Image (spheres, coloured by chain):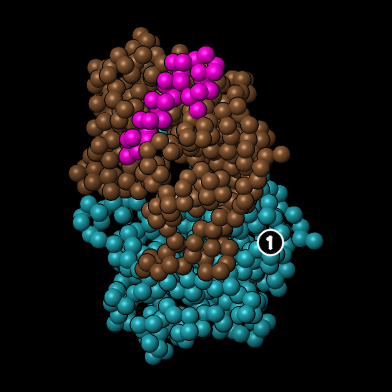
Chain colours: A cyan, B brown
Amino acid sequence: MNLLANVMRGNIMESRHYGFIALADSSGRVLLSSGAPTDDFISFLRSSAKPLQAIPLIESGAADRYGLTDKELALACASHNGEPEHVETALGILRKAGLEPEYLRCGSDYPLYEAARDALLIQGIAPAPLFNNCSGKHAGMLLVCKHMGWELETYTEPDHPLQREIMGVVTEFSGLDAANIATGIDGCSVVCFGMSTARMATAFARLADAAYWEKQNKPQRAIAVRRIAAAMQAHSFMVGGTARSDTDLMNSAGSSKIFSKIGAEAVWCAGFPEHGIGLAFKIADGASRVHPAIMARILRQAHLLPEADIQKFEEVQLKPITNKRGTVVGEYLPMFNLQEWA
Amino acid sequence: MNLLANVMRGNIMESRHYGFIALADSSGRVLLSSGAPTDDFISFLRSSAKPLQAIPLIESGAADRYGLTDKELALACASHNGEPEHVETALGILRKAGLEPEYLRCGSDYPLYEAARDALLIQGIAPAPLFNNCSGKHAGMLLVCKHMGWELETYTEPDHPLQREIMGVVTEFSGLDAANIATGIDGCSVVCFGMSTARMATAFARLADAAYWEKQNKPQRAIAVRRIAAAMQAHSFMVGGTARSDTDLMNSAGSSKIFSKIGAEAVWCAGFPEHGIGLAFKIADGASRVHPAIMARILRQAHLLPEADIQKFEEVQLKPITNKRGTVVGEYLPMFNLQEWA
């Protein structure tokens, strides 16, 4: 664990954030890191697992059978804002398989995006599963179950065939045996997967590097990872929404360079298809406010994106700390240097 | 800095919070601690300074001149929820001196308390300075300025006589020279004060121990600290509001045992008049979600409150981590043991 960023108020370090960073290739080799992201510190992928959880949607044939568009596929990999376009798209996924929102077991919620939440509140509309940031993922899960003839009512349970299938996917992407993958219950009730930051980076390298799966003699999986990465890049708004870090990062870099997925408790994973590299970092305390400052420094130190792209990202995401009257009173200051892995 | 609490999801430590704890008496002696709360790590008191910032309100004679009630005095020491009773009381303070909300320079905001915020939103009422959680403090500051004949428009500036007066108070309570007190701009635009957790605990011990000021031959200050502590205890709802940690803690302990004031970036200070002891702790990353678990453990290990009071506090404030469907999926687990100061 290393000091990753300080929270400065004036010239005083008011608070500090520690954590772990790993860049890995699809062989599982760690290329650059900070904080020793070994198996000694396990945390959960949380929503960063969504692109992995979407693999069965393609491999089962459900996406093709129900004619899922890339936009809909991106929403299945999303922690969306609950803006109207997200909600309509989630509903559209369900209806392609003749399903309704009643089947969603992610739990009722208001949209993440405050303006969307407030608009519903003013209209007197109550929290609902469709507004939950995970509704796209759950809609995708239901499509797999419907296609496979699996029970729809219990799809969130760890021993349901869908969740067992997803666990198999996670073992193959992380390189860990199922016995070495910690599990817990995610905010949206499905299984969540615990591993080191290095293993998370490996999983995203295997999402970014389709050739890895061709070498493993799994051409269908190579197609699936290419399709997921391309869908997230082409429909970055679906993956997050207005002012969201994933969306802004993918928009700043432009298509094909990066796909990106944050998770709860300050995990952030990304894949770089042009390099075949995966990135993962975790703020140990679970707070994501220093995410943009840390991501920009990683991208710059590892030369993963052109400087112009990084500056575009900083312009939209890297905000100073202001008081209630808008005066700048502080900033988030990244403090680490990536090291070659020994 | 020590590990103070883990965030458990299932049986996995998903995130962790480090920090500093100090219990001190009014001489500045640290009695118990965790994480070595020395002058090497400075953070800001933020809103935990409010009882100190209210001292000139009493000592100047402004509180008496304008007939401030203890309820109003408690609001001057508050980070209030912006519930209707808080807002009305803040307005009442201003009007006692013939002032209006236009004089407040804390910045416009919506209430902290979500239900109060939502109620305003539904009525189409915009954010305003009176709803700002600091409006009681700012109203109190304006009363001092009005009483003293000081400029009203510039009362938030560091070189305004009021802010210089408050800096003098902070030096006497913390035991630090002004040159050794770090300063910054608080969220509500006034000066904020940086010092070690040990110095914060000392300041609260001197709020709790009126006899200290009598020994210093400052009988007026002894009266002021007694009045502030009593006002906060008797009007705990004013200090925070519905579901707030300060309010719930003071209510659980009952009158005279404790007065309590949180600050931004996860500072929490309290005074124990029956013991003449001050407590301060700071979560280094600035997140207050583990505050209740840590406070309960401190109170228990230091024998500062009866076990029944601590349990009452835990019942209202110590919540497990649940998912969106209400299932318990984790908990906040305190990890420290208080040590005698060497």
Quadrant in the rendering for residue B39 = top right
Task: Where is residue B89? Give x, y as percent.
Answer: 26, 30
Front in this rendered view, residue B29 or B269? B29
Front in this rendered view, residue B207 or B191? B207
> Which chain is disc 1 placed on?
A
Residue identifier under label 1 = A37
Quadrant in the rendering for residue B235 = top left
Magenta stretch: includes residue B339: no
Task: Where is residue B116? Give x, y as percent.
Answer: 27, 44
- Residue B191 shown left or right of residue B153 in the figure: right
The part of the chain drawn in magenta is B209-237
Task: Where is residue B187? Give x, y as percent.
Answer: 44, 33
Q: In the rendered view, would you say A102 is above or below B144?
A: below
The residue sitting at the bottom extreme is: A149
**What residue is at 53 percent from the left and 23 percent from the top?**
B212
**What residue is at 38 percent from the left and 46 percent from the top?**
B252
| Crowding near the residue tagged with mark 1, few <14, some 14–19, many ≥20 C-alpha atoms within 10 Å | many
Q: In the rendered view, would you say B134 is above or below B266?
A: above
Which quadrant holds the N terminus of chain B?
top right
**What residue is at 42 percent from the left and 49 percent from the top?**
B309
